[in-house]
Amino acid sequence: MKPLRQNFIVCIVLLSSSSFCFFFVNFMMKNLNGSIIKNTIFSQSAEIVARALGGVIYMKVGARLSLSSMFMISTIGSIFLIIFYDREDLLPYFIIFTKFGVAAVINMLLIASVMLFPTQFTAAVFGYCNMIGRLFTVMSSLVAELDEPLNLMIFAVVACIGIIFSFFLLTKLPRFI
C-alpha cells in the first residue's frame, strides 16, 4: 500500500500544480500586453495540440519524463514571458509554450490515474486528487491579478514544484490482485 500512498500524494501535488497553472494562463490573458484575441487564439491552439499529443508523449516516453518535461516547457515559457513581457510581438509565442505544457500535463494525469492505480481505486483517486487540486486552483485567479512579473514568478515556482514531484512518481508497481 505504500506505493499507492506515494503515488496518491504525488498525483495530488501534480494535479494541483497543473490545474493552478492551466487556469492561471487563462486568467492572465487579459493582463498581457498586445491583442487579447491574438494571445487567446495562440493559447487555445496550443491547448488543442497539447491535448492531442499529450497521451502519445506519455505512452512513448513514460510518466516521469513526460510530466517533468511538459512542466519544464511551461516553466521556460513563463521565464520568457517574464523577460520579454513588454514585447507584444513575442508574447503569443511564449504563451504557446506556457499553455502547451500545462494542457499536456492535465491530459497525461488522466492517463496516469488509470495506469498507476488499480482499477477499483482509479475513480476515487482521481476524484480526490481533482477535488484537492481545485481548491488550489481557486488561487490562480487572484495570483493572475498580481503585478507582472510577480504573478509569472509564482507560476514558474508552481511549475517547478510539478517538475520536482513528477520524479517521485512510482511507475513500477507491485500487482495488487
Image: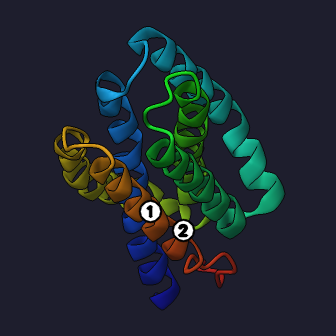
Numbered-mark total: 2
Q: Quadrant of the C terminus?
A: bottom right
On the image, the x and y values in percent for residue 84 come to 50, 40
Taking the spot 77% from the left edge, 53% from the top edge, the residue there is 59
Between marks 1 and 2 in the image, the one whose residue lies nearer the viewer:
2
Q: Which of disc 2 and disc 1 is earlier in sequence?
A: 1
Q: Amino acid at mark 2?
A: Ile
For residue 62, above or below residue 77: below
The answer, for residue 11, to whether it is visible in the render is: no
Q: CA distance from mark 1 to mark 2?
A: 9 Å
For residue 167, above or below residue 51: below
Colour pattern: rainbow
Say which residue label 2 marks.
163
Taking the spot 19% from the left edge, 49% from the top edge, the residue there is 139
Residue 106 or residue 131, whichever sits in front: 106
Instruction: Say what secondary structure mark 1 lies in.
Output: helix
| Direction from residue 65 to residue 143 in the image, left or right | left
Say which residue label 1 marks.
14
For residue 54, above or below residue 33: below
On the image, the x and y values in percent for residue 106 come to 51, 46
On the image, the x and y values in percent for residue 23 come to 34, 37
Residue 107 in which image quadrant? top right
On residue 167, the disc is none
The answer, for residue 97, to whether it is visible in the render is: yes
In the image as oriented, which residue stretches furthest toward the right? 60
Q: Amino acid at mark 1?
A: Leu
Local crowd at mark 1 within 10 Å, few (<14), some, or many (≥20)?
many
Residue 15 or residue 120, whichever sits in front: 15
Instruction: Say what secondary structure mark 2 lies in.
Output: helix
Local crowd at mark 2 within 10 Å, few (<14), some, or many (≥20)?
many
